[in-house]
Amino acid sequence: MGQIKILIVDDDAGMRVLLTRLLERDGYQVVTANDAMGALEAAEEHDPALVLLDVVLGGEDGRTLLPALRVKSDVPVVFLTGRGLEMDRIAGLRMGADDYIVKPFSHGELSARIQTVLRRTRSSEANHPPPPAGIVFGTLRIDLLAREVELSEVLVELTTMEFNLLAFLASSPRQVFSRQQLLELVWSSSSDWQNEATVTEHIRRVRRKIELDPDRPQWIITVRGVGYRFEPAAGSLPAAP
């Protein structure tokens, strides 16, 4: 068990220390992060077997980090929260979380839930071949490993950030993200030091490359006053390379 690595994402230093001690006592190797940007960097560098993710990160909704993690891997994610309302647990699980632990929790409960999620994940991997490392909606194909995009079997030339943005949105179809969230989760930045217009410009560029009519987009939809979402139903519509 000593080789199993767990990433703890929590903005509370005391909670990170406590969780680290408990998990190391169980024989896990622990990596920590205190915000979304640090979590994405740690996940990419350390390739953890499981992520413990606090729902509240410095006043932000930690759940918005989940789609960004999913772009990089299928690592199981367990949410930690101080709110035990059923509707909150259901919302988290529907977003793709593997489990939901309500604070305060005992060491025994934490250990049991982690073991259950890891066992379930390994069983699934053993019984099912890994899915192709890509996203396909109709004529649009996104190869996450080769970092290539094809539209109607024609290769689409995208810059690094254009690819990251499209892959991120397509990995969470119909989920709306604000420009601030996209700055944080795709650029690992924030509006404190980078203009949100960066997101708007990259959306415009991606639309020019994948939309039949960029002025009336079908794939990447603007939700007025909120942000953007990827529309999977566009796969049933005619598309141009």
Image: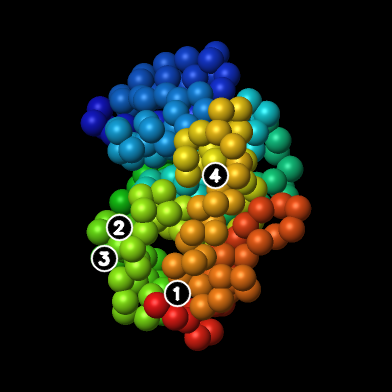
Going from the N terminus, do you reach mark 1 or mark 3 first? 3
Gap between marks 2 and 1, in whole Å? 16 Å
Q: Which residue is mark 1?
A: 137
Residue at image location 47% in from the left, 36% down from the top:
188
Decide: marks 4, 1 in contact (CB < 8 A)? no
Instruction: Report whether 204 appears left or right of 153.
Output: right
Amino acid tagged 1: Phe
Amino acid tagged 2: Arg
Q: Which residue is mark 3?
A: 129
Q: Which residue is mark 2?
A: 147
The quadrant in which residue 106 appears is top right
Going from the N terminus, do you reach mark 2 or mark 3 first? 3
Decide: marks 2, 1 in contact (CB < 8 A)? no
Numbered disc 2: secondary structure: loop
Q: Which residue is mark 4?
A: 198
Near-viewer residue (104 or 93): 93
Q: At which x and y percent is residue 160?
A: 36, 50
Amino acid tagged 3: Pro
Gap between marks 1 and 3, in whole Å? 21 Å
Residue at image location 49% in from the left, 19% down from the top:
16
Disc 1 residue crowd, few under 14, some 14–19, many 20+, Cα 10 Å: some
Going from the N terminus, do you reach mark 2 or mark 4 first? 2
- Colour convention: rainbow
Numbered disc 1: secondary structure: strand
The quadrant in which residue 55 appears is top right
**Mark 2 or mark 4: which is in front?**
4
